[in-house]
Image (cartoon, grey):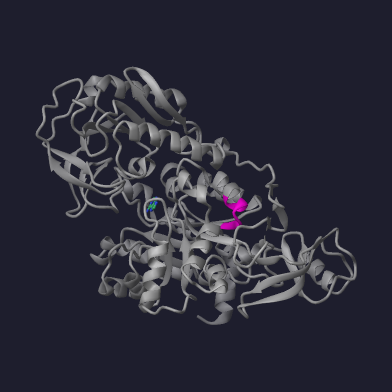
């Protein structure tokens, strides 16, 4: 395409324009130039700083001028007109604000509470999964929420899914061409994916391939989801246009991804805290170039974040002998460059958004002060994030209205095949050999009743769950991938009471024992997310985990177990809206029953 045509398309494209071209208008840019010319004052000057220059990969001394949300000047001079605020940064080390390139911002926290928490750890840019908003909200409302996030000090971007990673009743009505393309072309969306439906693409699904091509036409990236993929599969994925993957679990898998030209995102998450092992194995394999390596926390559940975010991952990289400049680049510059956003992010350089972390020491990545869009959100260790809010309810993210009741009849179990949980998230089928025609199962074994009930009350799927716990009597959650209600327990009455609690809370998680509530977590944002700050949720999750563990839960992360019961991107058997689903053979083994 010649340049003229491309410019016209960009011009006419309206919301297909990239967010970076919309950031500052002509008048603002002229004002920025006046500051350099000494005709106007900057708002803040960071004086005598030593900053990490990402282009030179070197620590350099400079004065840094900020105007509003933008870095205007980095160099030896001081402004002719003094700034409103001049901060002496002698003996301080400044690095670009950290970037989380792969967040699932709904693990009972919400995208705002995640951003507020992340900022305290120096992570001021987040790339978020659109999954729950895509599945649960009408398009305009979801995109209005996306726009609301441009008003907060953190830079919030999104990715646009091509598939639901479960078996929805009406996937075709939800993943429509119009809707996917509208998401993809939104200026805050940086990439398509994560591509969990790649087997479908390989076996001939041209609809997803078309969306992948559209993503590329928009100049955006595609992120894969390729656990255990062979070099041949990775090669095919690269040919299909995938730019990055975050599923490497060994050093060799990292090298494979790099070899096919993919940006490789190393994961440190609550269910796969692989980063130390990956870096060690990469070192053993002689990997010395980190330019196409980035780091992510893959939507960890709250308690995992107690140790930090990108700041913790940089510490791990340093512990593993990664050169200090590379360790910072993997959480900032490399990510910005991957998305073609290094003109905005990931550098302390003129013209960039003013996301800057102030450190006491080069090898101490936990910031003492954090600037986001030119505003202090952490100052000398004090949280100064402004009081921002997202009008969730205006855009339809209201408490969950469960306008039906369940009875023991809904909890009839007659299938010969159950689901065995073999770690927090992986399941396999097993043959049921116990008598299920009882109102309470024995606590001497670890088989429990399992039901998924449509959030609109229309259908149910019931079976047995082995390996969850032996003493959980009634447990219910609206925090699930599809937003339907999962019930687990030994005792039907307690399961029904747990459901009632979830209903009463307008969505949430409830643990009930002999009619008594042991733990209730209210999730008023459509039954999946809380409004409580992350620090609170960390304690809430720990409390739930302790109570579940006391009752025999023997895996690492019950929050993940709940989310993934219906997720068909994981092996081997799942409980979905269509029924019990065999992932490998892509078939519904036992369909959902209408109520
Ligand atoms: N694919 C996925 N979908 C939702 N949450 C996740 N957390 C980690 N991987 C995820």
Looking at the image, residue 168 sits to the left or right of residue 338; the answer is left
Q: Does residue 122 show up magenta in the picture?
A: yes
Front residue of 90/570: it is: 90
Front residue of 353/589: it is: 353
Magenta span = 118-125
Front residue of 388/309: it is: 309
Return the residue found at the far top: 515
Looking at the image, residue 290 sits to the left or right of residue 67; the answer is left
Q: Quadrant of residue 414?
A: top left
Front residue of 448/143: it is: 448
Q: Quadrant of residue 113?
A: top right
Residue 315 placed where, x, y %?
Answer: 52, 62
Q: Quadrant of residue 452?
A: top left
Looking at the image, residue 309 sits to the left or right of residue 421; the answer is right
Q: Please, is residue 247 above or below residue 58 in the view?
A: above
Looking at the image, residue 322 sits to the left or right of residue 232; the answer is right
Residue 583 placed where, x, y %?
Answer: 22, 52
Q: Residue at coordinates 40% horizontally, 21% vertically from top-left?
A: 517
Q: Residue at coordinates 55% horizontally, 61% vertically from top-left?
A: 99
Quadrant where the C terminus lies? top left
Q: Does residue 272 show up magenta in the picture?
A: no
Instruction: Please say whether residue 332 is visible from this viewpoint.
Output: yes
Q: Please, is residue 311 above or below residue 462 in the view?
A: below
Q: Residue at coordinates 44% horizontally, 33% vertically from top-left?
A: 543
Q: Please, is residue 262 above or below residue 489 in the view?
A: below
Residue 281 placed where, x, y %?
Answer: 36, 71
Instruction: Please say whether residue 456 is visible from this viewpoint.
Output: no
Residue 211 placed where, x, y %?
Answer: 39, 63
């Amino acid at each position: 395409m010649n340049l003229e045509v491309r410019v016209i398309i960009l011009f006419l494209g309206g919301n297909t324009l990239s967010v970076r071209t919309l950031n500052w208008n002509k008048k603002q840019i002229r004002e920025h130039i006046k500051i350099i010319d000494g005709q106007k004052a900057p708002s803040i000057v960071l004086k005598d700083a030593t900053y990490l220059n990402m282009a030179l990969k070197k620590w350099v001394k400079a004065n840094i001028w900020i105007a509003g949300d933008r870095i205007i000047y980095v160099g030896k001079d001081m402004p002719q007109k003094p700034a409103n605020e001049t901060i002496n940064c002698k003996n301080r080390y400044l690095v670009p604000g950290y970037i989380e390139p792969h967040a699932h911002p709904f693990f009972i926290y919400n995208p705002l509470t995640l951003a507020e928490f992340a900022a305290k750890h120096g992570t001021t840019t987040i790339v978020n999964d659109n999954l729950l908003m895509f599945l649960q909200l009408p398009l305009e409302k979801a995109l209005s929420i996306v726009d609301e996030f441009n008003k907060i000090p953190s830079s919030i971007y999104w990715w646009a899914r091509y598939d639901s990673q479960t078996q929805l009743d009406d996937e075709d009505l939800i993943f429509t061409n119009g809707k996917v393309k509208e998401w993809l072309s939104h200026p805050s969306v940086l990439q398509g994916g994560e591509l969990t439906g790649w087997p479908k693409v390989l076996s001939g699904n041209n609809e997803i391939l078309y969306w992948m091509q559209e993503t590329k036409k928009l100049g955006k990236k595609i992120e894969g989801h390729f656990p255990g993929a062979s070099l041949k599969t990775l090669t095919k994925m690269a040919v299909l246009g995938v730019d990055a993957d975050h599923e490497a679990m060994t050093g060799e898998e990292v090298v494979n991804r790099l070899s096919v030209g993919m940006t490789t995102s190393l994961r440190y998450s609550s269910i796969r805290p692989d980063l130390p092992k990956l870096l060690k194995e990469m070192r053993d394999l002689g990997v010395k170039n980190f330019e196409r390596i980035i780091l992510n926390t893959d939507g960890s559940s709250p308690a995992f974040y107690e140790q930090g975010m990108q700041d913790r991952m940089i510490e791990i990289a340093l512990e593993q002998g990664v050169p200090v400049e590379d360790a910072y680049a993997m959480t900032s510059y490399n990510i910005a460059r991957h998305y073609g956003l290094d003109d905005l992010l990931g550098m302390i350089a003129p013209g960039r958004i003013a996301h800057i972390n102030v450190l006491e020491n080069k090898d101490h990545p936990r910031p003492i002060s954090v600037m986001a869009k030119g505003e202090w959100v952490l100052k000398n260790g004090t949280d100064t994030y402004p009081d921002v809010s997202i009008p969730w309810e205006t855009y339809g993210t209201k408490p969950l209205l469960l306008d039906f009741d369940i009875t023991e009849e809904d909890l009839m179990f007659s299938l010969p095949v159950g689901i065995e949980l073999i770690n927090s998230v992986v399941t396999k089928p097993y043959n049921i050999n116990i008598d299920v025609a009882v109102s309470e199962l024995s606590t001497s074994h670890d088989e429990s009743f399992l039901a998924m009930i449509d959030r609109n009350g229309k259908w149910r799927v019931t079976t047995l769950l082995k390996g969850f716990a032996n003493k959980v009597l009634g447990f219910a959650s609206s925090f699930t991938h599809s937003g339907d209600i999962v019930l687990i327990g030994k005792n039907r009455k307690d399961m029904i009471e747990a459901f009632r609690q979830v209903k009463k809370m307008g969505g949430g998680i409830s643990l009930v024992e002999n009619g008594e509530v042991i733990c209730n977590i209210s999730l008023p944002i459509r039954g999946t997310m809380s409004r409580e700050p992350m620090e609170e949720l960390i304690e809430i999750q720990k409390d739930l985990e302790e109570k579940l563990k006391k009752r025999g839960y023997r895996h690492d992360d019950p929050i993940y177990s709940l989310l993934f019961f219906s997720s068909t991107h994981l092996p081997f058997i799942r409980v979905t809206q269509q029924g019990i689903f065999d992932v490998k053979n892509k078939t519904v083994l036992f369909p959902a029953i209408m109520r």
